Image: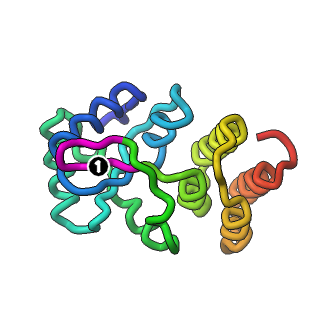
Amino acid sequence: MAPLDLDRERILRFLEAASRRLSGEWLLVGGAAAALWFSEERVTEDIDLVGLAGTPEERLRLMEFAAAEGLPVEAVNSAADFFLRRIEGWRDHIEPLLRGPSATIHRPDATLFLLLKCSRLSEIDLGDCLALLDFVRAEALALDRGRVLRTLVSLPETDDEALRLRRARLQAALEGRGES
Protein backbone atom coordinates (compact mmCIF):
# COMPACT_ATOMS: atom_id res chain seq x y z
CA MET A 1 0.00 0.00 0.00
CA ALA A 2 1.37 3.42 -0.95
CA PRO A 3 1.53 5.89 1.94
CA LEU A 4 -1.37 8.29 2.17
CA ASP A 5 -1.00 12.05 2.28
CA LEU A 6 -3.86 13.09 4.50
CA ASP A 7 -4.20 16.86 4.48
CA ARG A 8 -6.12 19.13 6.81
CA GLU A 9 -9.31 19.03 4.72
CA ARG A 10 -9.40 15.21 4.51
CA ILE A 11 -8.64 14.84 8.21
CA LEU A 12 -11.38 17.31 9.11
CA ARG A 13 -13.97 15.54 6.91
CA PHE A 14 -13.06 12.21 8.52
CA LEU A 15 -13.32 13.60 12.05
CA GLU A 16 -16.59 15.41 11.38
CA ALA A 17 -18.06 12.13 10.15
CA ALA A 18 -16.56 10.32 13.14
CA SER A 19 -18.15 12.81 15.53
CA ARG A 20 -21.53 12.00 13.96
CA ARG A 21 -21.19 8.22 13.65
CA LEU A 22 -18.96 7.04 16.50
CA SER A 23 -19.85 7.22 20.17
CA GLY A 24 -17.84 8.03 23.25
CA GLU A 25 -14.82 10.23 23.74
CA TRP A 26 -11.79 10.23 21.48
CA LEU A 27 -8.43 11.99 21.44
CA LEU A 28 -6.72 13.10 18.24
CA VAL A 29 -2.93 13.28 18.53
CA GLY A 30 0.11 13.35 16.27
CA GLY A 31 0.36 14.90 12.83
CA ALA A 32 -3.40 15.01 12.31
CA ALA A 33 -3.79 17.10 15.48
CA ALA A 34 -1.00 19.38 14.26
CA ALA A 35 -2.70 19.82 10.87
CA LEU A 36 -6.02 20.81 12.41
CA TRP A 37 -4.66 22.96 15.20
CA PHE A 38 -1.47 24.85 14.43
CA SER A 39 0.08 23.68 11.16
CA GLU A 40 -2.50 23.90 8.38
CA GLU A 41 -0.06 22.77 5.67
CA ARG A 42 0.89 19.60 7.59
CA VAL A 43 0.09 16.27 5.94
CA THR A 44 0.26 12.88 7.59
CA GLU A 45 0.07 9.22 6.63
CA ASP A 46 -2.38 8.30 9.38
CA ILE A 47 -4.87 9.68 11.84
CA ASP A 48 -3.88 8.92 15.43
CA LEU A 49 -7.24 8.67 17.16
CA VAL A 50 -7.45 7.12 20.61
CA GLY A 51 -10.64 6.00 22.33
CA LEU A 52 -10.57 7.36 25.88
CA ALA A 53 -12.23 4.28 27.32
CA GLY A 54 -9.28 2.25 26.03
CA THR A 55 -11.31 -0.77 24.97
CA PRO A 56 -10.71 -3.20 22.11
CA GLU A 57 -14.31 -2.55 21.02
CA GLU A 58 -13.48 1.11 20.44
CA ARG A 59 -10.53 0.17 18.25
CA LEU A 60 -12.68 -2.21 16.24
CA ARG A 61 -15.41 0.43 15.77
CA LEU A 62 -12.77 2.93 14.64
CA MET A 63 -11.35 0.51 12.06
CA GLU A 64 -14.82 -0.38 10.79
CA PHE A 65 -15.64 3.30 10.51
CA ALA A 66 -12.41 4.03 8.63
CA ALA A 67 -13.14 1.23 6.15
CA ALA A 68 -16.68 2.55 5.66
CA GLU A 69 -15.18 6.01 4.97
CA GLY A 70 -12.91 4.58 2.29
CA LEU A 71 -9.68 4.68 4.29
CA PRO A 72 -7.52 1.62 4.79
CA VAL A 73 -7.62 0.49 8.42
CA GLU A 74 -3.88 1.20 8.55
CA ALA A 75 -4.72 4.89 8.11
CA VAL A 76 -6.18 5.07 11.61
CA ASN A 77 -3.87 4.41 14.48
CA SER A 78 -4.79 3.97 18.12
CA ALA A 79 -1.37 2.78 19.30
CA ALA A 80 -0.72 6.19 20.84
CA ASP A 81 -2.91 5.12 23.76
CA PHE A 82 0.05 3.15 25.13
CA PHE A 83 2.14 6.33 25.33
CA LEU A 84 -0.77 8.51 26.40
CA ARG A 85 -1.65 6.40 29.42
CA ARG A 86 1.95 6.55 30.67
CA ILE A 87 1.65 10.33 31.16
CA GLU A 88 0.43 11.22 34.62
CA GLY A 89 -2.63 13.46 34.60
CA TRP A 90 -3.08 13.33 30.82
CA ARG A 91 -6.86 13.77 31.11
CA ASP A 92 -6.26 17.23 32.55
CA HIS A 93 -4.56 18.21 29.30
CA ILE A 94 -7.23 17.56 26.67
CA GLU A 95 -9.54 20.06 25.02
CA PRO A 96 -12.69 19.50 22.96
CA LEU A 97 -12.17 19.78 19.22
CA LEU A 98 -15.45 18.49 17.72
CA ARG A 99 -18.73 17.45 19.31
CA GLY A 100 -21.23 15.23 17.57
CA PRO A 101 -24.52 13.71 18.66
CA SER A 102 -22.83 10.86 20.53
CA ALA A 103 -19.09 11.45 20.23
CA THR A 104 -16.65 14.11 21.32
CA ILE A 105 -13.23 14.35 19.73
CA HIS A 106 -10.60 16.07 21.82
CA ARG A 107 -7.09 17.28 21.07
CA PRO A 108 -4.17 17.56 23.49
CA ASP A 109 -3.17 20.91 24.92
CA ALA A 110 0.33 22.16 24.15
CA THR A 111 1.89 20.45 27.17
CA LEU A 112 0.45 17.03 26.38
CA PHE A 113 1.23 17.33 22.67
CA LEU A 114 4.90 17.95 23.46
CA LEU A 115 5.03 15.23 26.12
CA LEU A 116 3.71 12.73 23.59
CA LYS A 117 6.34 13.74 21.00
CA CYS A 118 9.37 13.83 23.34
CA SER A 119 10.30 10.17 23.55
CA ARG A 120 10.40 9.31 19.85
CA LEU A 121 11.26 12.77 18.54
CA SER A 122 11.72 11.91 14.89
CA GLU A 123 12.62 14.74 12.51
CA ILE A 124 8.90 15.19 11.76
CA ASP A 125 8.11 15.17 15.50
CA LEU A 126 10.71 17.88 16.08
CA GLY A 127 9.20 19.96 13.30
CA ASP A 128 5.77 19.61 14.91
CA CYS A 129 7.17 20.58 18.32
CA LEU A 130 8.95 23.66 16.98
CA ALA A 131 5.86 24.74 15.02
CA LEU A 132 3.75 24.32 18.14
CA LEU A 133 6.19 26.37 20.22
CA ASP A 134 5.96 29.17 17.65
CA PHE A 135 2.16 28.93 17.78
CA VAL A 136 2.12 28.92 21.59
CA ARG A 137 4.27 32.06 21.59
CA ALA A 138 2.17 33.82 18.93
CA GLU A 139 -1.15 32.95 20.59
CA ALA A 140 0.07 33.32 24.21
CA LEU A 141 -1.14 29.81 25.05
CA ALA A 142 -0.46 28.03 28.31
CA LEU A 143 2.43 25.57 28.33
CA ASP A 144 4.10 23.80 31.25
CA ARG A 145 7.62 24.22 29.86
CA GLY A 146 9.15 22.96 33.09
CA ARG A 147 7.31 19.66 32.91
CA VAL A 148 8.20 19.15 29.26
CA LEU A 149 11.84 20.01 29.94
CA ARG A 150 11.99 17.63 32.93
CA THR A 151 10.56 14.87 30.76
CA LEU A 152 12.95 15.61 27.91
CA VAL A 153 16.11 15.62 30.04
CA SER A 154 15.02 12.49 31.94
CA LEU A 155 14.88 10.37 28.78
CA PRO A 156 17.41 7.53 28.59
CA GLU A 157 20.73 8.26 26.91
CA THR A 158 20.89 7.34 23.25
CA ASP A 159 23.68 6.31 20.89
CA ASP A 160 21.77 7.95 18.05
CA GLU A 161 23.63 11.21 17.40
CA ALA A 162 20.79 12.62 15.27
CA LEU A 163 18.30 11.99 18.08
CA ARG A 164 20.64 13.64 20.59
CA LEU A 165 20.83 16.70 18.34
CA ARG A 166 17.03 16.83 17.95
CA ARG A 167 16.60 16.60 21.72
CA ALA A 168 19.13 19.41 22.23
CA ARG A 169 17.34 21.56 19.66
CA LEU A 170 13.97 21.01 21.35
CA GLN A 171 15.50 21.73 24.75
CA ALA A 172 16.99 25.00 23.45
CA ALA A 173 13.63 26.02 21.98
CA LEU A 174 11.81 25.22 25.22
CA GLU A 175 14.37 27.26 27.16
CA GLY A 176 14.00 30.15 24.74
CA ARG A 177 17.53 29.76 23.36
CA GLY A 178 18.15 29.74 19.64
CA GLU A 179 15.60 29.61 16.88
CA SER A 180 12.61 27.31 16.89
Rendered position, 36 above or below 47: above
Relative horizontal placement of residue 28, taking residue 154 as reference (left or right) = left
Relative horizontal placement of residue 94, taking residue 2 as reference (left or right) = right
Q: Which residues are magenta?
A: 98-106
Residue 93 % position (x, y): 50, 60
Mainly helix, strand or loop, the magenta region? strand
Rendered position, 111 above or below 88: above
- Rendering quarter of residue 99: top left
Q: If the image is split into quadrants, where does the C terminus sit?
A: top right
Colouring rule applied to residues: rainbow
Name the residue located 17 percent from the left edge and 35 percent from the top edge.
Answer: 69
Residue 119 % position (x, y): 59, 63
Relative horizontal placement of residue 180, taking residue 125 as reference (left or right) = right
Name the residue located 30 percent from the left edge and 47 percent from the top edge.
Answer: 76
Q: Residue tagged by mark 1? A: 104
Q: If the image is split into quadrants, where does the N terminus sit?
A: top left
Dot 1: within a 10 Å radius of its alpha carbon, few (fewer than 14), some, or many (20 or more) residues? many
Q: Residue furthest right?
A: 177
- Rendering quarter of residue 11: top left
Queried whether the magenta region covers residue 99, the answer comes back as: yes
Queried whether the magenta region covers residue 165, the answer comes back as: no
- Residue 62 or 25: which is nearer the viewer? 25
Residue 153 % position (x, y): 74, 69
Name the residue located 36 percent from the left edge and 60 percent from the top edge.
Answer: 79
Q: Looking at numbered disc 1 in the image, what kind of residue is underneath it?
A: Thr
Q: Dot 1 lies on which element?
A: strand
Name the residue located 23 percent from the left edge and 49 percent from the top edge.
Answer: 103
Q: Is residue 165 visible?
A: no
Residue 137 % position (x, y): 72, 40
Q: Is residue 98 visible?
A: yes
